[in-house]
C-alpha cells in the first residue's frame, strides 16, 4: 500500500510504527492486522477487534481516539470506501466540537462509507475531493462558519436543517423529494402546532423528538386501495398470462415497492393467482412476493391483511368471494395469500434492491421524488429486474428521463419492459455498500467474460465485416466491432456522444438514411462507393443489416464498413487507342461533372433537410420540455390528489371527533354558565390583552361590569375602596408566570385577591384568572382582637417598622398603640434583642415558610419588665410597601416559664436529697401502662438508667422467688382497692447479688375512685 500511494503523491509516505510522533506533510499507512490509536501525541498500534464483522483496520477507533485527545481541534474526513466504517468516529469528533467533512456520493467510486457518515447527521460539509483540497485552509480558518462552502451542496435554510434533523432521527433522506410536497406537509404540521415561522418549528423539532416523529409520519402519505386505477389493472391482467407462461415452472418473484397498507400487494397477488389458474393453497409454492415500505405503522396493517367492509366496493365480487373472509365489520385476506407475501421495512432510495425480479410494481411513489431521485430509483429497478421482467407504474408516472432503461409495453400504457440493449452513455447502477464489494470480488476472484449471446453477436458481426458498429433505432452507438477510428471525425463542433453523427461526411448522412430504410423494410441495404480520403485510392461501401426483435420491442442495425478494391489504371497500346481513350476520358469527365453537380445539389438538399431536421428537433425538444412540464404537473396533481384524499380521510375522522367534542363542549359550556351564574364567588377571567372573557355574577356586581361577554378591558372595572390596581397586578402576573396573592382591608372586610396565570397547550401564558375572597366583619373582629388583653399582635416590616400592634403589646412597650404605628421596634426594646429579631425575620422571609413558631424572651427598653412570649409568625404582603411583612401573634407564657423553672429547681433539690439519704422513688402510671424509676432505684437494681426501660412485669421479676408472689399480691390489691402498703423483701439484682430492700407505696385515685397511679419510695437495707 505504501508503494502504491507513493506513486500518486509528492508527499512522503511511511508505514505506522508503534509510538512514533506524527510529522507534518507525511502520509502514514496502517500496517495489516493492526489498528491505530492516537494517544498522548503519538500513534499507537493495537490488536484489531476480534469481532468477525468489524473492519480491520478500524477508522472508527482511530477517529474516536483523535477526538478524545484533541477535542474541538480534531478534523475527520471520510472519502470513498465500502461499508460503514468511520460513521461512529465522525459522531465522536462532532460530539467533541471538531470539524467533519465527507466526500459527496456522486464523486465517490464506492459510496458506502460516505453515505453512512452522512446518515449520522453529524457532518459539517459534503464536498468533492478537489473542493476539499482547495478549501481546506479556508475551512480550518472559518471559525466553524461553513455557509460559504455549503452554498452548492447543503443549502443553509430552515427546511434543509429540518431535513437534516429528519435524516439523523429516522435515517431517511428527504432532500431529493419534491420540495413542494415537503413544504406543504411542513406547513401542515406548523398550522397544527400554531407555529408561524419555519425557524421556530425547526428549533421546536430540535428539542422535541416526538414532533420529528409526527412530521415523519405526515410525510409518509400511505394512501392506497384495492385495484386502484381499474383500467391499468385490466391491462396488467391481460399481460400476466404471457409472463407466467414465459416463466414456466420457476417460482415467480414479485416486488411491490411502497406498498403502504398492503391493498395493492393483495390486488397483485389475486391477479397472479388468477393468471396461474391455481388454487390458493398452491400459490406460495409458485410465487414469492416482496412488499416493502418505510412506514412501520402501515406495514403492521398490511401484515394483518384486515380491512374495513368498504374495501369490497373496489374488489370484483368473484375475487372477493374467493380470496377474502368476511366478519361483522371487516374483511381479511385468506391465509394462503398472506403467507406468500414478505413485508419488510425497505427504502428504495437507500437500501440494496431485491434481485432477479419478474414483476416490479411501484405505483404512485415516484411522483413524490425529484427528477434526479426518480432516475436513481429507476436505475435500481433496472438492476433488480430479470431481462424479460415487467415494471408496473401509476397513472401519473412514466420512465421519462430513463428511456434508455425501459420501453413501454405495446399492450399497456403503464407497463414497461426492461431494455437489454442500452446506449454506451447510459449510467450503470451502483448499489451502495454492496455493488462496490461485488465488483471488487468479481475482479479479484474470476472474470467470466462476455456471455454466449454476446460472443455469438460478435462472431456474426465479424463474419459480415472486420469493422462495424451496432446502432439503435435512435442512431445511438451501442457497440463497436473492430477498429472504426478511420471513419470517425471529431472536431470542436462535434457532439461528444456515441452517435452516428461522429462518422465522417458523407458516411454520416448515408448511414442515417440506410439505417432508416433497412429498419423500415427489414432488408439489407448498401450504399455507394466512397473515397476514404483525398490522395488515397482506398474505397469503401456501407452495408446495413437490420436486427429486429419484435417480442422484446427492440430494433437495432449493424453498419458494416466494407472495403472495395481500387480500379486498375487505364493502359494505352497505340495511337488509336489513345484517341479513343481521349474521347472516353472526355465522356467520363462530363459524367463526373454531372455527378459532381448532382452531388452538390443532393448535398444542398441534404443540408436544407438537416436544417429542417434541426428546426424540427428544436421544436421536438420544446415539445419534450412541455411534455415533461405537463408530466411534472400531472405528478403534482396526482400527489395533491393523494394528499387531499389522505386529508379528506383525516378530516372525516377529525370531523367526527369535533362533533363529539362540540357536543361535550356545549354541555360543558352550559355547565360553566350555570356555575358562573350561581357560584357565590367573585371570579373573573381575562385574555393576554386583559380583556374580560368570563365573570361570575358576583364579579359583575362587585366591579360594575355591564356585559362581560362584550370583553371590556380590566382597567374599566370599578374598584371598591382599598383594592389595588388590577391591570398592573395582572400584567405582573403574566410577566412572571406565577401566582400573585394580595391581602388587604376593604370597607371593613378582610379581602384576599389571588391572580393566577393560565397556560395554553404549548406552555405559553394565555391570560389570567382573578379570584376575590371577602371575609365580612373580619377587619372589625381584628380590631376587637387587637384591643383584647393578653393577646400580643404585631405587624412589622423587614426594617422593623411597626405597622399594626395590639393593646397588650403596646402596654408592654409602655406606649399607646397609635403612638407606636410608624415607629421602629428598636426604640422600645433592648438593642441586642432588636438585632436578633431582625435577623430572625429576614431568615424567615427568605426561607419561604408559611409560618414559624418560637419562644422568645423580651425585655422592655428601660429593663424594668421581662416577658416570655410564645409566638406564631406569618408572612403577609403589604400593598402600600409592595413587599412582604411579618405578622406576629403571641401569648404571654411568663408565669408558665417561671413555674416550669421552679418545678425544675424543686425536682433537682428532691433528687439531691434522695442521693444524700439513699432513698429512691418509683411510680406506676395505670392509664399509660408505664413505670418510672429514679437513679437510686436503678442503682439498687444494678441497671443502667440510659439503656434499661422498666416495666411492671420486669420490676416484679427482680424479687426473690420466695417473695415474688406476695409482692405481686400487694401491688394487685393496691390497684384494685387503693390500699397503701409497706414491706421488706429481697431482690436479685442484675449482677446476681441478693439485696434486701424496703418499699412504701400509696395509690392515687380519680374522683370516681379508680386507681390511676401508684407512687412509692425504695431503699436498700
Image (tube, grey):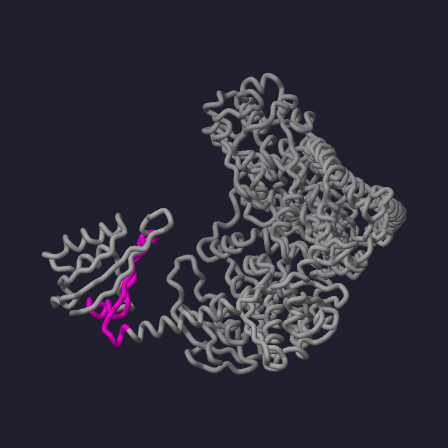
Q: Is residue 568 visible?
A: no
Q: Position of residue 947 (x, y in %)?
A: 27, 66
Judged left or right of residue 233, residue 604 is right
Q: Position of residue 373 (x, y in %)?
A: 67, 49
The magenta stretch spans residue 931: yes
Name the foreground residue: 242 vs 435. Answer: 435
Q: Position of residue 865 (x, y in %)?
A: 58, 76
Q: Is residue 153 visible?
A: yes
Name the foreground residue: 814 vs 925. Answer: 814
In the rendered image, the quadrant that contains the C terminus is: bottom left
Is residue 297 positioned above or below 209 on the image?
Answer: above
Q: Residue at x 62, y 43 (%)?
A: 464
Tell me which segment is drawn in magenta: 914-943
Judged left or right of residue 173, residue 1012 is left
Is residue 637 positioned above or below 950 on the image?
Answer: above
Q: Residue at x 52, y 34 (%)?
A: 303
The magenta stretch spans residue 70: no
Name the foreground residue: 700 vs 793. Answer: 793
Is residue 912 positioned above or below 265 on the image?
Answer: below
Amino acid at each position: 500500500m505504501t508503494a502504491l500511494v507513493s506513486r500518486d503523491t509528492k508527499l512522503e509516505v511511511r508505514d505506522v510504527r508503534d509510538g512514533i510522533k506524527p510529522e507534518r506533510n507525511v502520509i502514514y499507512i496502517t500496517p495489516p492486522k493492526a489498528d491505530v490509536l492516537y494517544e498522548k501525541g503519538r500513534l499507537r498500534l493495537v490488536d484489531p477487534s476480534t469481532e468477525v464483522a468489524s473492519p480491520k483496520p478500524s477508522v472508527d477507533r482511530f477517529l474516536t481516539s483523535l477526538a478524545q485527545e484533541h477535542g474541538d481541534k480534531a478534523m475527520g474526513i471520510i472519502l470513498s470506501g465500502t461499508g460503514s466504517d468511520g460513521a461512529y468516529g465522525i459522531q465522536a469528533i462532532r460530539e467533541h466540537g471538531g470539524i467533519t467533512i465527507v466526500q459527496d456520493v456522486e464523486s465517490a467510486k464506492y459510496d458506502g462509507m460516505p453515505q453512512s457518515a452522512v446518515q449520522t447527521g453529524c457532518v459539517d460539509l459534503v464536498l468533492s475531493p478537489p473542493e476539499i483540497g482547495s478549501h481546506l485552509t479556508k475551512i480550518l480558518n472559518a471559525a466553524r462558519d461553513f455557509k460559504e462552502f455549503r452554498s452548492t451542496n447543503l443549502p443553509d435554510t430552515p427546511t434543509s436543517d429540518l431535513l437534516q434533523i429528519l435524516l439523523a432521527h429516522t435515517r431517511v433522506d428527504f432532500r431529493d423529494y419534491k420540495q413542494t410536497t415537503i413544504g406543504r406537509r411542513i406547513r401542515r404540521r406548523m398550522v397544527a402546532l400554531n407555529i408561524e415561522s419555519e425557524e421556530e418549528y425547526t428549533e421546536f423539532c430540535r428539542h422535541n423528538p416526538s414532533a420529528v416523529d409526527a412530521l415523519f409520519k405526515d410525510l409518509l402519505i400511505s394512501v392506497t386501495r384495492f385495484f386502484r386505477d381499474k383500467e391499468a389493472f385490466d391491462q396488467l391482467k391481460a399481460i400476466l398470462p404471457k409472463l407466467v407462461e414465459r416463466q414456466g415452472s420457476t417460482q415467480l418473484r414479485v416486488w411491490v415497492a411502497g406498498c403502504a397498507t398492503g391493498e395493492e400487494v393483495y390486488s397483485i397477488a389475486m391477479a397472479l393467482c388468477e393468471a396461474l389458474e391455481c388454487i390458493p393453497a398452491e400459490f406460495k409454492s409458485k410465487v414469492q412476493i416482496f412488499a416493502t415500505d418505510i412506514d412501520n405503522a402501515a406495514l403492521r396493517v398490511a401484515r394483518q391483511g384486515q380491512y374495513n367492509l368498504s374495501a369490497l366496493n373496489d374488489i370484483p365480487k368473484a375475487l372477493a368471494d374467493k380470496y377474502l373472509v368476511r366478519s361483522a365489520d371487516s374483511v381479511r385476506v385468506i391465509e394462503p395469500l398472506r403467507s406468500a407475501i414478505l413485508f419488510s421495512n425497505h427504502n428504495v432510495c437507500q437500501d440494496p434492491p431485491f434481485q432477479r425480479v419478474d414483476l416490479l410494481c411501484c405505483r404512485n411513489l415516484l411522483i413524490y421524488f425529484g427528477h434526479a431521485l426518480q432516475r436513481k430509483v429507476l436505475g435500481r429497478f433496472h438492476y433488480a429486474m430479470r431481462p424479460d421482467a415487467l415494471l408496473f407504474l401509476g397513472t401519473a408516472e412514466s420512465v421519462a428521463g430513463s428511456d434508455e432503461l425501459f420501453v413501454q409495453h405495446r399492450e399497456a400504457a403503464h407497463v414497461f419492459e426492461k431494455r437489454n440493449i442500452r446506449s454506451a452513455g447510459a449510467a450503470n447502477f451502483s448499489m451502495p455498500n454492496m455493488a462496490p464489494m461485488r465488483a471488487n470480488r468479481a475482479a479479484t476472484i474470476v472474470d467470466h467474460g462476455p456471455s454466449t449471446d454476446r460472443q455469438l453477436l460478435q462472431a456474426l458481426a465479424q463474419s459480415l465485416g472486420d469493422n462495424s458498429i451496432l446502432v439503435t433505432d435512435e442512431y445511438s452507438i451501442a457497440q463497436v466491432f473492430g477498429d472504426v477510428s478511420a471513419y470517425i471525425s471529431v472536431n470542436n463542433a462535434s457532439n461528444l456522444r456515441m452517435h452516428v453523427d461522429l462518422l465522417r461526411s458523407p458516411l454520416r448522412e448515408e448511414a442515417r438514411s440506410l439505417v432508416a430504410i433497412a429498419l423500415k423494410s427489414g432488408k439489407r441495404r448498401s450504399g455507394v462507393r466512397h473515397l476514404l480520403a483525398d490522395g488515397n485510392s482506398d474505397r469503401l461501401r456501407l452495408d446495413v443489416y437490420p436486427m429486429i426483435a419484435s417480442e422484446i420491442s427492440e430494433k437495432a442495425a449493424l453498419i458494416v464498413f466494407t472495403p472495395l478494391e481500387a480500379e486498375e489504371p487505364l493502359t494505352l497500346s497505340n495511337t488509336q487507342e489513345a484517341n479513343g481513350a481521349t474521347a472516353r476520358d472526355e465522356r467520363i469527365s462530363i459524367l463526373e461533372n454531372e455527378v459532381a453537380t448532382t452531388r452538390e445539389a443532393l448535398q444542398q438538399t441534404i443540408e436544407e433537410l438537416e436544417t429542417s431536421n434541426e428546426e424540427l428537433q428544436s421544436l421536438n425538444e420544446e415539445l419534450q420540455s412541455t411534455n415533461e412540464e405537463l408530466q411534472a404537473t400531472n405528478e403534482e396533481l396526482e400527489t395533491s390528489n393523494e394528499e387531499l384524499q389522505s386529508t379528506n380521510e383525516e378530516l372525516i375522522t377529525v370531523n367526527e371527533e369535533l362533533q363529539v367534542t362540540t357536543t361535550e363542549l356545549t354541555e360543558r359550556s352550559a355547565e360553566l354558565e350555570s356555575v358562573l351564574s350561581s357560584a357565590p364567588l367573585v371570579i373573573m377571567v381575562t385574555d393576554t390583552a386583559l380583556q374580560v372573557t368570563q365573570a361570575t355574577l358576583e364579579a359583575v356586581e362587585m366591579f360594575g361590569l355591564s356585559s362581560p361577554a362584550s370583553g371590556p378591558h380590566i382597567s374599566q372595572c370599578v374598584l371598591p375602596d382599598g383594592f389595588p390596581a388590577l391591570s398592573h397586578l395582572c400584567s405582573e402576573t403574566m410577566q412572571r408566570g406565577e401566582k400573585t396573592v394580595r391581602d388587604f382591608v376593604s370597607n371593613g372586610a378582610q379581602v384576599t385577591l389571588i391572580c393566577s396565570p393560565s397556560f395554553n397547550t404549548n406552555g405559553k401564558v394565555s391570560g389570567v384568572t382573578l379570584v376575590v375572597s371577602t371575609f365580612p366583619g373580619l377587619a372589625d373582629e381584628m380590631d376587637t382582637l387587637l384591643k383584647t388583653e393578653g393577646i400580643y399582635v404585631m405587624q412589622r416590616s423587614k426594617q422593623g417598622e411597626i405597622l399594626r400592634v395590639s393593646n397588650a403589646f403596646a402596654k408592654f412597650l409602655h406606649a399607646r398603640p397609635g403612638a407606636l404605628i410608624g415607629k421602629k421596634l428598636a426604640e422600645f426594646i433592648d438593642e441586642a434583642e432588636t438585632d436578633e429579631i431582625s435577623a430572625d425575620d429576614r431568615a424567615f422571609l427568605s426561607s419561604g415558610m408559611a409560618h414559624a413558631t418560637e419562644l422568645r424572651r423580651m425585655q422592655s427598653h428601660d429593663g424594668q419588665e421581662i416577658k416570655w412570649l410564645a409566638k406564631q409568625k406569618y408572612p403577609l404582603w403589604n400593598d402600600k410597601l409592595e413587599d412582604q411583612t411579618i405578622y406576629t401573634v403571641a401569648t404571654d407564657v411568663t408565669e408558665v416559664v417561671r413555674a416550669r423553672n421552679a418545678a425544675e429547681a424543686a425536682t433537682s433539690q428532691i433528687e439531691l436529697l434522695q442521693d444524700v439519704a439513699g432513698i429512691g422513688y418509683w411510680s406506676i402510671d395505670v392509664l399509660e401502662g408505664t413505670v418510672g424509676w429514679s437513679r437510686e432505684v436503678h442503682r439498687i437494681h444494678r441497671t443502667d438508667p440510659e439503656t434499661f426501660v422498666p416495666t411492671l412485669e420486669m420490676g416484679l421479676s427482680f424479687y426473690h422467688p420466695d417473695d415474688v408472689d406476695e409482692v405481686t399480691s400487694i401491688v394487685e390489691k393496691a390497684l384494685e382497692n387503693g390500699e397503701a402498703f409497706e414491706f421488706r423483701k429481697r431482690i436479685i439484682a442484675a449482677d446476681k447479688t441478693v439485696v434486701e430492700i424496703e418499699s412504701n407505696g400509696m395509690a392515687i385515685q380519680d374522683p370516681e375512685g379508680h386507681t390511676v397511679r401508684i407512687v412509692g419510695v425504695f431503699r436498700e437495707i
